[in-house]
Image: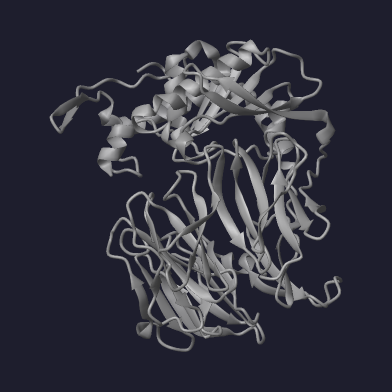
């Protein structure tokens, strides 16, 4: 091992080690670095190597502390610490949350719809700051106001166990009810005229395998199990239908789901099974006027919206079909219309559709060529406007109301950057890069309009688990861009940016597509004149850290710097440990 203060980093020793599975023997000379006491470091040799790495890093960064401090101050100045959300109407109340300066936790507020906006009628319904005071750990889980607005249920983990204790407060009196449910890991759903709560408990594997009903005022020992899941790979969750008439109990693993409906006013009634589980088929359900609306991937991998009568829930008729270009990610029902959300050729799309006219389709148009947008919280059944969220790489997070009558977007709130931000100084583009196999890979990029061509570029990638990377806004990113960097996101295969086929094309035996796409994007950025070899910094975390490890080994000359956050790089050993 080299001296930790030298110009070269310490190099881990190689020690003979092998393991055999299914008749295949694998050599792993670095197996000794897997500390038997993980997450504690108990092996003295492992500890010595880690300390040497840390010492080398500190020595290399010693002359950069002034720059680090300046960057931290710069980034901190862009964060508005005292902030509040846009009030949202739900029944007779307007609800919002607030952050106070210096506080780590939120305060939840409301006021009557008819009350003046002068603070005189504001009611603090949950104070996370007070609840967290004096605790080493605090995390809010679920929070749910009863339909009549008179009771509040919430859950808290205050010891880091990831098991949450649910409690109930009488909002009329401010008093805590005696009801207390430990060990939950779920939403809290009001049923039976707000007399009961449906929840799920975490089992020994931190999975939810049940849906339980708690009657307010009764001992939890008398809680009723509404559903139990026998498959250890599935998780159970509960919610209410948009019209609040049905309790929806869903169970699923990573590729298969099954849904049951129970009348919300009679939660102990016999559940209605919508469709028996079938491996590889995912679906979710809502209901309106005796008709089920089903979002499913049974006929196309990019999903469809189907309908079925309540009396025959397995008889599905296609309402909206997903296509190779249109990936349907979800839907929302309202009294007079429904919303279909998805991605069209990789860009977020929000469509208004109407029950009485299936041919009437109204997509909401946004001004930029690369952006992210979606429905925000819309708790009411009868609506004349929709709450939306929007952002791009150059447009700060924005909350809109979309007025249905005149198709107008009303800006309610734009993320404030206290130190100042002028979006007109920047440009964002959406490009397509031809990968080595001819596949077109989308790239979202931003830079200052006064940036010199061929300057440094930062390229970010993930490409795993069917997770899309949205081209949203980041204040920390500005510290690079304002210093002459272009910042690009490579929407590589392995995510579902272009649909489920895009995800499948970057997994298992096709995993190398993910790595090749990233390299090909970098080469294309050079060819287009955005940057030069050696002036590209790259980053990715977890599975994106695996990506970093692959591309730094395959094309080291391309990169000027590599940041691998918690990299998932020893995949085989990690999976065998599971």
**Residue appearing at x 45%, y 43% in the figure:** 301
Residue 456 in picture, x, y percent from top left: 66, 17
Locate residue 36 relative to residue 331 in the image: left or right: left
Residue 194 in picture, x, y percent from top left: 55, 83
Locate residue 19 relative to residue 372 in the image: left or right: left
**Relative to the observer, which residue lies in front, 101 or 192?**
192
**Relative to the observer, which residue lies in front, 253 or 245?**
245
Q: In which quarter of the image is the N terminus?
A: top left
Q: Quadrant of residue 267?
A: bottom left
User: Vertically, is 479 above or below 385?
Assistant: above
Identify the coloring: one colour
User: Vertically, is 110 above or below 537?
Assistant: below
Q: In which quarter of the image is the C terminus?
A: top left
Q: In which quarter of the image is residue 576?
A: top left
**Residue appearing at x 35%, y 72% in the figure:** 227
One can see residue 295 in this view = yes
Locate residue 454 relative to residue 287 in the image: left or right: right
**Relative to the observer, which residue lies in front, 248 or 206?**
248
> Residue farthest to the bottom?
217
Residue 65 in picture, x, y percent from top left: 64, 28
One can see residue 35 in this view = no
User: Vertically, is 548 above or below 337?
Assistant: above
Residue 180 in picture, x, y percent from top left: 46, 79
User: Vertically, is 451 above or below 93?
Assistant: above
Q: In which quarter of the image is residue 107?
A: bottom right
Tell how many labels. Answer: 0
**Residue appearing at x 48%, y 13% in the figure:** 556
């Amino acid at each position: 091992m080299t001296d930790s203060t030298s110009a070269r980093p310490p190099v881990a020793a190689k020690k003979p080690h092998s393991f055999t599975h299914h008749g295949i023997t694998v050599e792993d000379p670095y197996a000794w670095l897997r500390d038997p006491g993980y997450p504690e470091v108990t092996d003295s040799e492992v500890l010595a190597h880690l300390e040497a790495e840390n010492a080398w890093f500190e020595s290399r960064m010693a002359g950069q502390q002034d720059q680090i401090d300046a960057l931290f101050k710069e980034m901190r100045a862009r964060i508005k610490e005292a902030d509040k959300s846009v009030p949202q109407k739900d029944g007779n109340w307007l609800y919002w949350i607030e952050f106070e300066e210096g506080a780590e936790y939120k305060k939840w507020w409301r006021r009557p719809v008819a009350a003046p906006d002068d603070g005189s009628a504001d009611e603090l319904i949950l104070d996370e700051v007070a609840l967290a005071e004096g605790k080493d750990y605090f995390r809010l889980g679920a929070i749910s106001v009863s339909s009549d607005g008179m009771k509040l249920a919430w859950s808290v983990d205050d010891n880091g166990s990831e098991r949450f204790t649910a409690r109930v407060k009488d909002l009329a009196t401010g008093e805590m009810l005696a009801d207390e449910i430990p060990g939950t890991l779920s939403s809290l759903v009001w049923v039976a005229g707000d007399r009961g709560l449906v929840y799920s408990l975490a089992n020994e594997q931190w999975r939810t395998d049940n849906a339980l009903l708690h009657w307010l005022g009764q001992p939890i020992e008398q809680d009723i199990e509404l559903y139990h899941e026998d498959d250890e790979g599935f998780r159970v969750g509960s919610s209410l239908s948009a019209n609040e008439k049905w309790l929806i109990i869903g169970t699923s693993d990573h590729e298969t789901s099954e849904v049951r409906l129970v009348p919300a006013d009679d939660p102990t009634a016999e559940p209605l099974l919508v469709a028996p589980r079938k491996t590889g088929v995912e679906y979710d359900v809502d209901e309106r006027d005796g008709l089920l609306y089903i979002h499913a991937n049974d006929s196309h991998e990019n999903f469809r919206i189907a309908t079925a009568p309540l009396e025959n829930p397995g008889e599905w008729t296609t309402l909206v079909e997903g296509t190779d270009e249109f990936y349907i990610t979800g839907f929302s029902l309202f009294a007079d219309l429904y919303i279909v959300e998805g991605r069209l050729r990789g860009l977020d799309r929000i469509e208004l559709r109407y029950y009485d006219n299936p041919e009437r389709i109204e997509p909401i148009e946004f001004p930029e060529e690369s952006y992210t947008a979606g429905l925000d919280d819309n708790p009411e059944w009868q609506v004349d406007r929709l709450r939306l969220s929007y952002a791009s790489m150059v447009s700060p997070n924005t909350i809109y109301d979309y007025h249905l009558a005149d198709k107008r977007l009303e800006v309610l709130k734009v993320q404030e950057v206290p130190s100042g931000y002028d979006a007109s100084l920047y440009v964002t583009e959406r490009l397509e890069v031809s990968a080595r196999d001819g596949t077109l890979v989308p790239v979202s990029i931003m830079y200052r309009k006064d940036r010199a061509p061929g300057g440094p570029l930062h390229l970010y990638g993930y490409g795993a688990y069917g997770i899309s990377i949205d081209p949203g806004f980041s204040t920390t990113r500005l510290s690079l861009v304002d210093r002459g960097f272009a910042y690009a996101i490579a929407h590589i295969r392995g995510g579902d940016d272009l649909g489920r086929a895009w995800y499948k094309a970057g997994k298992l035996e096709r995993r190398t597509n993910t790595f090749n796409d990233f390299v090909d994007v970098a080469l294309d950025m050079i060819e287009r004149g955005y940057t030069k070899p050696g002036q590209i910094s790259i980053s990715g975390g977890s599975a994106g850290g695996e990506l970093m490890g692959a591309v730094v080994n395959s094309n080291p000359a391309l990169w000027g710097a590599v940041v691998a956050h918690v990299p998932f790089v020893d995949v085989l050993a990690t999976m065998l440990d599971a």
